[in-house]
Amino acid sequence: MIEVSKRTLVLAASVTTVLFLSFGFPGAGAATIDDLLFPKRAAFIETDAAIVEKDGKVIYERYGNEYTPATKHLSWSIAKSVAGILVGVAIDRGYFKYNDPIRKWFPETKSTATVLDVLQMSSGLDFQEEYLGIPVRADVVRMLYLDGPKVGNASYAAARPLRSGNHEPGKHFYYSSGDTNLLMEILRLSMPKAKYETFPWDALFLPLGIEGAVFERDAKGAFVGSSYVYLKPRDYLRLGELVMNSGFWNGKRIIPAAYFKLMGETAPGVAVDPVDGTEYATAYSAMARTN
């Protein structure tokens, strides 16, 4: 499942849950898992934490780079899957609907996308997801570090123009941190302030037994769902278990059935006509990469 980014991988399988928090990906040929993930010589990978669980028991756990079981690790784009689950819970509780147009909250936007379109990274907004280059023109960098901190991440994303030639919502997938942060602002504007302040903990973290989670916010107080959750390694393992167990935890449904179904279905914009150059163009659902 959850989200594969350039720096972080969480993989949930039917038998085994593996957590790699790393700075790259190694080549083949290692004799043991230690050789693969914690090579004695500098190689392609520097692993911070690795956990293997089978049949509900941890059978391998090791840390590197001064990380410990108590160290909180930056999620990067795993946060997108957390954000999507929170949106699914909010919809299930009646705060808004999948077919609500995002103009309900962002009247300035040129996009006619619905909440569902945005969940499936198909808003049609021209948002450049690129982290390299000088001068900095990439929207994701400008949103997170330059313009967005002044006005709010969602305000930056909503003001983007439509993508040229292939902007019909729901028809063209393009991986966008801007889309995720639009959802976080919709979440903020759709519920009482006191409810929003604790919503990630009440809806997800605490039911999983995750204590001490950190979720950064932008200038308007919206959670930065694209990137900035901090959890301990075994907390990420719990997220993997939750998905592996079809959204249930200790017999209680945490991920609503409708949203869990979306997580397992390829987004229409991927199947129809993903934008050239986009990441994960053959395997994405709703704020999650599919297998």
Image: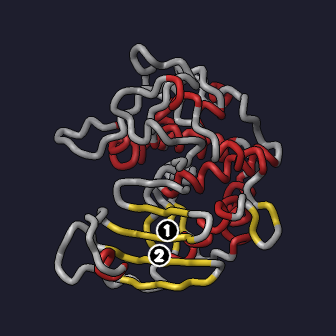
Q: Where is residue 32 in the image (x, y as percent from the top left)?
A: 34, 81
Nearest to N terminus: mark 1 or mark 2? 2
Crowding at dot 1, Cα within 10 Å, few <14 / some 14-19 / many 20+, comes out as: many
Q: Nearer the viewer, residue 81 or 146?
A: 81
- Residue ID at (54%, 68%): 214
Eyeballing the image, is 285 above or below 196? above
Q: Is mark 2 on a helix, strand or loop?
A: loop
Residue 151 at least partly seen: no
Q: Can residue 20 be seen in this view?
A: yes
> Percent position (x, y) of residue 147?
37, 41
Q: Do the residues labelled 1 and 2 touch (CB within 8 Å)?
A: yes
The label on residue 230 is 1
Quarter-of-image position of residue 198: bottom right
Residue under the image location 49 percent in, 68 percent down: 230
Calculate the distance from the C-alpha at mark 1 to the C-alpha at mark 2: 5 Å
The residue indicated by pointer 2 is: 72
Q: In this view, does 137 lie above or below 167?
A: below
Q: Which amino acid does label 2 sit on?
A: Lys
Image quadrant in which you'd find residue 251: bottom right
Element assignment for label 1: strand
